[in-house]
Image (cartoon, grey):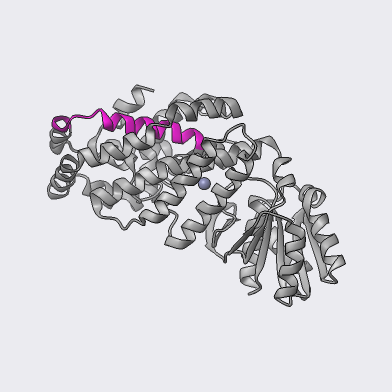
Amino acid sequence: MEVVWERPYEVFSEFMAANSYKSSLIICDRNTFDVCANKVKETAEKANIKYKIVCFEPDVVADEYALGKVLFEIEQADIFVGVGSGTISDITRYTAYKFKVPFVLFPTAPSMDGFASSVAALTINGLKTTVLASSPEAIFVDMEAIENSPKILKKAGFGDLMGKITALLDWQLSHIIFDETIDLEVLQIVKDTYLKTLNSVGENHFYKNLLEGLITSGIMMVRVNSSRPASGCEHHLSHFWEYHRIKTYHGIKVGLATLYVLRFYEHFLNLDKSRILERKEYRVDIESWKDIIKRGFQPTFESIIKQNIGRASKLNDKEFRYNVINRLVEKKEVIDELIRDAIGVYDELIDAYKKLEIPINYWEIGIDDNLFKISFLCAPNIRERFTILHLYEFLGLTDEVVQSF
Ligand SMILES: [Zn+2]
């Protein structure tokens, strides 16, 4: 997959010619038409490429209705061209996949990491789901459109990218404790991109670095066929808050959650081996575990309990506890080193959030005290993938950390 940073419209025209694509379906919304899709249209006209435009309202949701609109309007097209950010790229990615047509993207905001992704986030029957789709053939970047995109979308993209700090730590933690497969090259590439972006806040190439980081994260997910390089418990927290209809962009929630998750890692750094060994005897009280889920997951708590009861019971398995505790103690120095290396950016991160006016406290996005406190115990039930919050659930030390916030 090619990412084009210079002369995007000319290169798009060359790309169409090189592949003998003669007809296209341009998918956009009214805003992205004005900043970018109109130029795609002009390019198509100049190059004698047939085109049809499906233009949505700016607040479109990637749901059955939107997918149906594409189905209704489609005529012969060799390729789909999505012009927009999250929603438009999901609609394009999924419909192109269903119609077995290749597609390219013109991102219009650095708002999320899904551009290169091979899955689409859709809302079906009112519920968010992730479905299989395909990756774009190429991504054409009009930096002028990116730089002029709404501020809130840029903040969201920055938050989503900074979430990689804890996503990568979670991946490493799981690798060390449970031998989960890891790809060190992928890990390093993602780390380099978030650092490059963080180090360039306020500078000339900041938005280019940000978009590049987001696109790269997506490419790395495709490479390892897993969202591990881009998503850990900061995403589980974000999904939990979304379940509670906390109304702000995905990346804003992820960015905020990242700050709290880093505090869990900091706590682990200060945890003595003797303290860890003591936790061998800890038992999860299944009744209070169920109670937290009841409070956190109304009205679907029963299915959450059902999905997680096996996982929760295993936390009390003697052999499992001993094995994990022994591994933690044995590898404590290695884990500490990784944590130290990653959380060194904490102060810089806070400065960057302040500079970009990104929330750094839970109440700023409408989370109340009660919801906040149970978030860290509820998040491990969102997904089984092991994270620092799963480790703290296992150690029974979640509340100790939350009380220090
Ligand atoms: Zn994300």
Q: Which residues are magenta?
A: 255-275
Q: Quadrant of the N terminus?
A: bottom right
Query: In the displayed structure, does residue 222 sit left or right of residue 55?
Result: left
- What quarter of the picture does the C terminus occupy? top left
| Figure disc tally | 0
User: Viewer-proximal residue, 156 or 215?
Assistant: 215
* Residue 293 part of the magenta-drawn span: no
Is 322 left, or right, of 207 in this rendering?
left
Q: Position of residue 11 (x, y in %)?
A: 73, 63
Residue 271 colored magenta?
yes
Q: Position of residue 124 (x, y in %)?
A: 59, 57
Which residue: 46% across, 62% down?
223
- Decide: is 348 above or below 310: above
Q: In x, y percent, where is residue 328? A: 19, 42
Q: Is residue 301 above or below residue 116?
A: above
Q: Residue at x 77, y 76 (%)?
A: 76
Give the overall secondary structure of the magenta segment.
helix
